[in-house]
Image: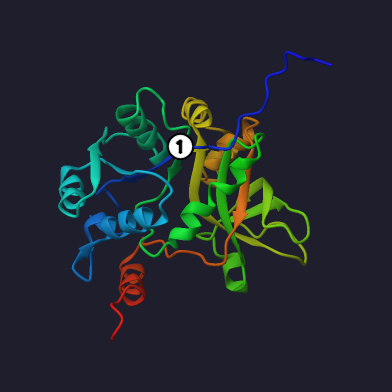
Amino acid sequence: MNENKTPPPAAPTNPIVVIPSRLASMRLPDKPLADIHGVPMIVHVWRRAMEADAGPVIVACADFQIIDAVKDAGGDAIYTNPNHASGSDRVFEALHTVDPLKKHDCVINLQGDLPTIDPEAVKASLLPLANGDVDIATLVSPITDEAELDDPNVVKAVLSMADGADCGRALYFSRTAVPSGEGPHFHHIGLYAFRRAALDRFVKLPRGDLEQQECLEQLRALESGMRIDAQRVDTVPLGVDTPADLDRARELLAPQAT
């Protein structure tokens, strides 16, 4: 028996939520500031993260207008390099700026264009990290609309998951309908909970061939041997990428009549 073997890391005890955000968008310019019933979209996302009560929430911005919007709402936001290639890189910079002593052992990377996300789903993203072998956790929801199987904008997750379980190991992600044949298919939700050491490793990895072929950043982690587990949730949040998506978000977030 190897008594010197390093034990796996424990479940995170001090998470932080970082929301990367920038104004540049090809299909919906300035979308973080898009008005949803008098409130900028980024503020809606910040509110959902605060309601999750998973840890402190920081918005990592590439533009000072976003910082102003978040701070006007009472939130915390910091400026980051506008030239980052990905949200993960922006989260990494922000995390090291606000927590150089590495007191936070886990970071939830929450996209800034998910104003309808369920706060409970944000918190649920931490559950797979109870397994010390898991580097990165994410979310999935069962696909019930067959049209999504052939929609390249819907990323499918291939999971190894026991019958009756709510969490499984991610084997692959694709924009095509995988796996083939009958059986469950899962809609991947682009939210990630990284162990601190896993994020440090991930942002230093070179882009992988599969990542470039599928245009899916998470494949870089799988190609490099990192483990991603996915927690099953019941609902898929609306990602706002187009004017039509924005209209739908306004419908979903319309104040309820009393």
Which residue is farthest right?
1
Q: Is residue 238 left or right of residue 247?
A: right
Q: Is residue 34 left or right of residue 120?
A: left
Asked whether 54 or 180 is in front, the reply is 54
Residue 153 placement (x, y as % from top left): 50, 60
Residue 2 placement (x, y as % from top left): 80, 15
Relative height, residue 197 to residue 234 (above, below): above
Q: Can I make out residue 113 in this image? A: no
Residue 37 placement (x, y as % from top left): 22, 71
Q: Is residue 207 left or right of residue 62?
A: right
**Could you tell me the amino acid type at mark 1?**
Asn
Relative height, residue 125 to residue 82 (above, below): below
Q: Which class describes the residues within 10 Å of circle 1: few (<14), some (14-19), or many (20+)? A: few
User: Which residue is painted at 43% across and 48% down in the image?
Assistant: 54
Q: Is residue 203 left or right of residue 169?
A: left
Asked whether 256 or 61 is in front, the reply is 256
Asked whether 185 or 214 is in front, the reply is 185
Relative height, residue 182 to residue 60 (above, below): below
Residue 237 placement (x, y as % from top left): 45, 64
Asked whether 175 or 77 is in front, the reply is 77
User: Which residue is painted at 78% across and 60% down in the image?
Assistant: 163
Q: Can I make out residue 66 in this image? A: yes
The answer to which image quadrant residue 145 occupies is bottom right
Quarter in which the C terminus is drawn:
bottom left
Say how many tags the image has.
1
Quarter in which the N terminus is drawn:
top right
Label 1, on which residue?
14
